[in-house]
């Protein structure tokens, strides 16, 4: 049973593109810590992700689980937002197949603990490779334009090349 722990960003951005439903096709269980729930559903009321994440929790494929190591969370919060800190602490405790984070600092911190990390673009690349979407370019353009997600141009080109898509002139 593949399991993932997620931070806020992948949930918000996938929801903004109407692609949150990719997650239960990849993972049987998606765990989020309370800080992520608060950020996405409670504080994010009326914004992309709020209703979708609430619905996912009601459907049972997304669960809220609190990390038990408060000292680790506090240590991580010195450099990270509370959602990122709680997600990393939860991933250390739950040993999921992957932790879903987009922010560079959080990805680096997760790597320090030898956690397998992917983010929104990695999820879209997997969706393309598994035939769940037809064009990574179209989806990354939507991610940029509809979800307001910043993508480094080099990463954009490398992701397209990795799935066999190319951009004109490259």
Image: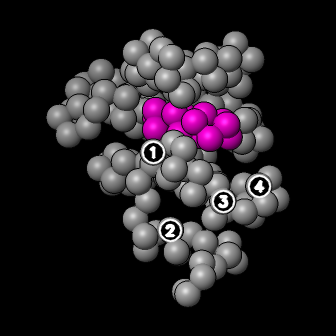
Is disc 3 surrounded by few (<14), some (14 to 19) or many (20+) residues within 10 Å? few
Q: Is residue 11 magenta?
A: yes
- Point out which mark residue 138 bears: 3
Q: Is residue 156 above or below residue 88?
A: below
Mark toward the start of the polypeptide (2 vs 4): 4
Q: Secondary structure at mark 4?
A: loop
Q: Quadrant of residue 22?
A: top right
Mark toward the start of the polypeptide (4 vs 3): 4
| Residue on which disc 4 sits | 133
Q: Secondary structure at mark 3?
A: helix
Residue 29 in view here: yes
Question: Pointers 1 and 2 in contact (CB under 8 A)?
Answer: no
The single residue placed furthest to the right in the displayed view is 131
Is disc 1 surrounded by few (<14), some (14 to 19) or many (20+) residues within 10 Å? few
- Pick the quarter of the image with the C terminus: bottom right
Name which residue lies at 60% across and 78% down.
167
Name which residue lies at 63% across and 64% down.
137
| Residue on which disc 1 sits | 148
Stretch of the chain drawn in magenta: 3-20
Q: Label 1 to label 4, Cα distance in Å? A: 20 Å
| Residue on which disc 2 sits | 156
């Amino acid at each position: 049973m593949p399991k993932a722990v997620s931070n806020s960003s992948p949930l918000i951005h996938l929801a903004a593109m109407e692609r949150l439903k990719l997650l239960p096709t990849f993972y049987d269980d998606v765990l989020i810590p309370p800080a992520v729930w608060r950020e996405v559903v409670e504080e994010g009321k009326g914004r992309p992700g709020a209703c979708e994440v609430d619905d996912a929790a009601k459907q049972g494929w997304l669960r809220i689980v609190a990390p038990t190591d408060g000292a680790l969370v506090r240590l991580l919060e010195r450099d990270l937002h509370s959602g990122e800190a709680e997600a990393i602490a939860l991933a250390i405790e739950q040993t999921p197949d992957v932790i879903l984070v987009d922010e560079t600092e959080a990805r680096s911190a997760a790597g320090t603990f030898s956690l397998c990390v992917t983010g929104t673009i990695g999820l879209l690349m997997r969706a393309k490779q598994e035939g769940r979407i037809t064009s990574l370019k179209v989806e990354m353009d939507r991610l940029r334009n509809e979800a307001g997600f910043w993508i480094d141009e080099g990463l954009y080109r490398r992701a397209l090349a990795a799935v066999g898509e190319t951009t004109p002139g490259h």
